[in-house]
Image (cartoon, grey):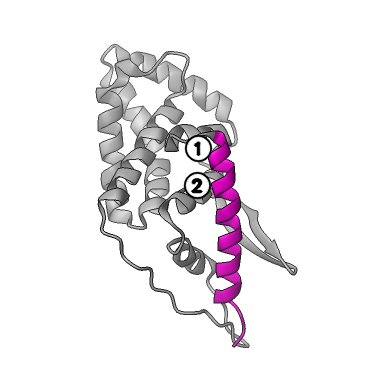
């Protein structure tokens, strides 16, 4: 099971906005184990296929839910990602990690779905913290993310919530690394401004 620990995304005037991040305790070891199951899958081992699904399903659903903001649709995308991944398994080089392969498929499927949606304006009422009240940061964060453009939102999610490297994000989004850096800078700035406006005292 992944450990959960906080990480600061935006910091201003002593106030910190925290995202919950899933941190792998032994990524290298999992990669080696994945490679073994993957090799068995290539030889038609259905049990190994089931194991790989069980190992990665929760993470795929999480990232899909973060991007799509719809838990039910996220489960559909995760299932679609596995079907596509195993159908095209022959295209995965033996020196490439299965986790990155399935992850890229999932994110691209999410982005395809977002492009198919009609643009809908995000609705968000200013959040005011009264004495004795408590703001649920998680709810506020998700609403604020919804106000960012698709490219900025996905870049911020992949970097800060899913901890992908700049190179991995560039690969998933099919843009240069420089574009990822630029989008991330803008996304952080805009998110900070949104957070300050949403939590500002009346």
Residue plotted at (54% across, 75% down): 198
Closer-to-camera residue (46/106):
106
- Residue 18 falls left or right of residue 87: right
Residue 173 visible: yes
Note whether 91 is above or below 84 in the view shown: above
Q: Name the residue under label 1.
A: 169
**Whole-percent x and y of residue 95?**
47, 14
Q: Give the range drawn in magenta.
A: 177-202
Q: Quadrant of residue 179?
A: top right
| Dot label at residue 155 | 2
**Whole-percent x and y of residue 2?**
53, 42
**Whole-percent x and y of residue 194?**
55, 68
**Whole-percent x and y of residue 202?**
59, 88
Instruction: Answer whether residue 20 is magenta in the image.
Output: no
Q: In which quarter of the image is residue 98?
A: top left
Note whether 79 is above or below 41 in the view shown: below
How packed is label 1: few (under 14 Cα within 10 Å), some, or many (20 or more)?
A: many
């Amino acid at each position: 099971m992944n450990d959960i620990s906080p990480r600061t995304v935006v910091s201003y005037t002593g106030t910190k906005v925290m995202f919950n991040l899933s941190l792998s305790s032994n990524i290298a070891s999992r990669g080696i184990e994945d490679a073994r199951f993957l090799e068995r899958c290539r030889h038609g081992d259905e049990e190994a296929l089931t194991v790989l699904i069980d190992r990665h399903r929760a993470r795929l659903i999480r990232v899909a839910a973060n991007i799509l903001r719809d838990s039910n649709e996220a489960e559909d995308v995760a299932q679609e990602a596995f079907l596509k991944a195993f159908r095209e398994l022959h295209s995965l080089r033996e020196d490439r990690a299965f986790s990155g392969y399935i992850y890229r498929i999932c994110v691209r499927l999410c982005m395809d779905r977002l492009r198919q949606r009609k643009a809908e304006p995000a609705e968000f009422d200013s959040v005011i913290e009264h004495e004795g009240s408590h703001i649920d940061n998680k709810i506020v964060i998700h609403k604020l993310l919804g106000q960012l453009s698709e490219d900025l939102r996905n870049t911020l999610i992949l970097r800060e919530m899913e901890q992908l490297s700049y190179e991995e994000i560039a690969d998933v989004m099919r843009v240069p690394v420089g574009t990822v850096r630029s989008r991330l800078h803008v996304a952080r700035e805009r998110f900070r401004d949104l957070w300050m406006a949403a939590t500002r005292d009346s």
